[in-house]
Image: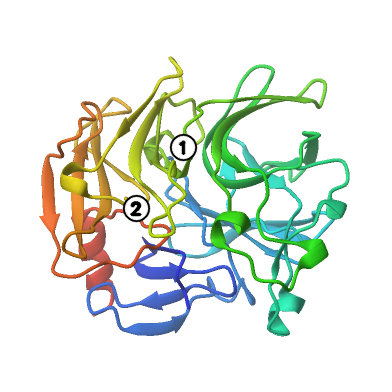
Amino acid sequence: VANTNVGLFADHLLVYYEGGLPHSMHPETLDTQGTYNFGGALDILCTAHYKIEPSTGNMLFYSAIGPRLTWYEADTSGTVVDSFGFDMGCPAMVHDYIVSEHLAIFLISPNQFRLDRIMEGRPGVLWDESATPNGSRFAVLDRRTHEVTWYDTGLMLAPTHFFNAHETATGIVVDLHVIARLGNPADDSDEPIDSHSWFPPAMAWRFVLDTATGTTTQHMHSGIAGEFPKINDAWLGKENRFGYFATTRDLSPLTLTDGLARHDFSTGQTVVLEGPDGLTSPSEPVFVQRRGASGENDGYLLTLWWNPATGLSELLVHEADAFTREPLARVKLPVRVPFAFHGSWAEAEVLDAAIAAQR
């Protein structure tokens, strides 16, 4: 049931989900090879939202089990070289997080992940504001010293996914999508509810954490609802100008997403592209940097779209800098790719090396 993310790391094709360890698959045949536990360093689960540090190629990730969150760093061979655990104060569902140059940043919210209820066959994702009575809180882990600093927002909200974060002389800037609630209401936790009530539209926000006062300020970047934010991953942890996401403007029961957006953090402008020829339901965009690129936005966006007229999917390639409705290429697939969550890009050399390592 590994349905959340996929990527190549340490010559393994790894697929991830929230409820256990990732599985390794053959990078060419896709044969399942079994669970991957980073040389025995993990025993229960790991997040599907790992980050790859641009300067080292190391994987930065964590596991969250009950109220305990454990941070990990693995080198390019898959060996864990750092770990540290801390108490979140509640069994928060920490689906995604972000890193800056020296920090790992988590938003602890009323969104609870209850494994005990899941084992009973009951809804395990709950919205329980009593778990964080003073509102959602940022937990900021210094990756060098393992010191954890807390920043209260005073707001009842949950993170969905993060764009990026960077450090300044006075604080930490965090860009992410937030949502007003996420999960079954705790006071009626066994009654099924529709997906748009369980998961209402998210908005792009910026939080600034003041390291001197321990306070936060925030504002909404854009009034366009959306999800699955992405950046050029080479800019992870440092100040970036552009972010991309799939829009969720229409609460249709047939689709989740309905357009592709680019947000300019320097001007505040959000540009939305509609699908050509009626295409809809774009996937999370994946940024592919052009070979030899030096600028942040010099590259391509890959997205999977659904064609309602044919019932099939298409892979669209947009030029990130121009960002026009007509893509550079449309790859018409012979099947419908079911709507999913996350994905990644691997250069040919990386894929070839992973295949060769299997021989």
In-front residue for pair 355/247: 247
What's the residue at 81%, 34% (across, down)? 154
In-front residue for pair 296/195: 195
Q: Is residue 331 above or below residue 277?
A: below
The quadrant of the rendering that contains the C terminus is bottom left
Indicate the position of residue 342 as horizontal and vertical percent values: 41, 57
For label 1, count other residues whose C-alpha is less than 10 Å away and answer few (under 14), some (14-19) or many (20+): many
Q: Which mark is residue 66?
A: none
Q: Which mark is residue 283?
A: 2
SS type, badge 1: loop
**Which residue type carries mark 1?**
Leu
SS type, badge 2: loop
Indicate the position of residue 209 as horizontal and vertical percent values: 71, 27
Q: Which mark is residue 236?
A: 1
Left or right: 84 in relation to 194: right
In-front residue for pair 336/10: 336
Say if residue 95 shows up in the picture. Answer: no
What's the residue at 67%, 41% (across, down)? 144
**Would you say the residues marked 1 and 2 are in contact, meaning their CB atoms lie under 8 Å apart?**
no
Indicate the position of residue 145 as horizontal and vertical percent values: 73, 42
Judge depth for marks 1 and 2 and give the one in front: 2
Say if residue 65 shows up in the picture. Answer: yes
**Which residue type carries mark 2?**
Ser
What's the residue at 47%, 49% (across, down)? 251
Indicate the position of residue 312 as horizontal and vertical percent values: 19, 64
What's the residue at 80%, 57% (across, down)? 128
Give the Cα distance between marks 1 and 2: 21 Å
Q: How is the image coloured?
A: rainbow
For label 2, count other residues whose C-alpha is less than 10 Å away and answer few (under 14), some (14-19) or many (20+): many
